[in-house]
Image (cartoon, grey):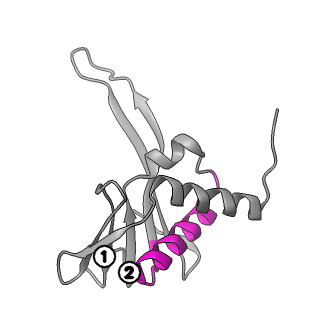
Amino acid sequence: MKYIIDKTQYDKTVIKLLYSVIGKITTEKTDFDTVSVWDKNKDRIATIWIKSAYATKGCKAELEFNKSEMISKYLPIVKKKRFSKLLALYFEKNTGIKIDCVQYFTNYRWVKSDYEGDEDSYESDIVSYNIKKKKFNEI
């Protein structure tokens, strides 16, 4: 059975999920161009690169989200542009830093090794989205 979810339902679901899974966040400026973001359990969930050489070209403040695997267990991240905008909105609201770009991982999967003796590996795809330009970045 297929369910159709419109934009407002998806937005509400993602925002509520972020608030329940991540909760209240705290920030710590670790370097002159880096802000670490911690969740309610004191786990590092994100890094914000501000005008850094590590940020994607054209981004003044890039959010690198580390817990997308946890989010994708509850809700598949199929609407990548929409999810990126909502993720940036959530962190802007809670940190006060205007986010230009978002980077996170999606499509987690086990990959069997082709060679005997090698271990199976865990792979994912990287999503890098520029909110201002409304396009995906090349990585």
Residue 58 painted magenta? no
Separation (CA) of disc 1 from disc 2: 5 Å
The percent coordinates of residue 125 (x first, y second) are: 45, 48
Q: Where residue 76 sits in the image (x, y, percent)?
A: 60, 45
Q: Which of 120 and 93 is in front in this view?
A: 93
Answer above or below: position of 129 versus 13: below
Residue 53 appears in the picture as rendered? no
Q: Name the residue under label 2.
A: 61
Kindly report the secondary structure that dominates the magenta region of the rendered protein.
helix
User: Closer to the N terminus: mark 1 or mark 2?
Assistant: 1
- Give the magenta range: 78-101
Quadrant that contains the C terminus: bottom left
Among the 4 quarters of the image, the one containing residue 53: bottom left
Question: Can residue 105 be seen in this snapshot?
Answer: yes
Residue 79 or residue 41, whichever sits in front: 41
Q: Pick whichever, 39 or 85, lies toward us.
A: 39
Q: Mark 1 points at which residue?
A: 49
Q: What residue type is labelled 1?
A: Trp
Give the farthest residue toward the left. 31
79 with respect to 108 (left or right): right
Q: In which quarter of the image is residue 132?
A: bottom right
**Viewport quadrant of the N terminus:** top right
Q: In which quarter of the image is residue 102?
A: bottom left
Query: Where 8 falls versus 20 (above or below)?
Result: below
Q: Which residue corresponds to the image point at 44% horizontal and 45% vertical from the top-left?
A: 69
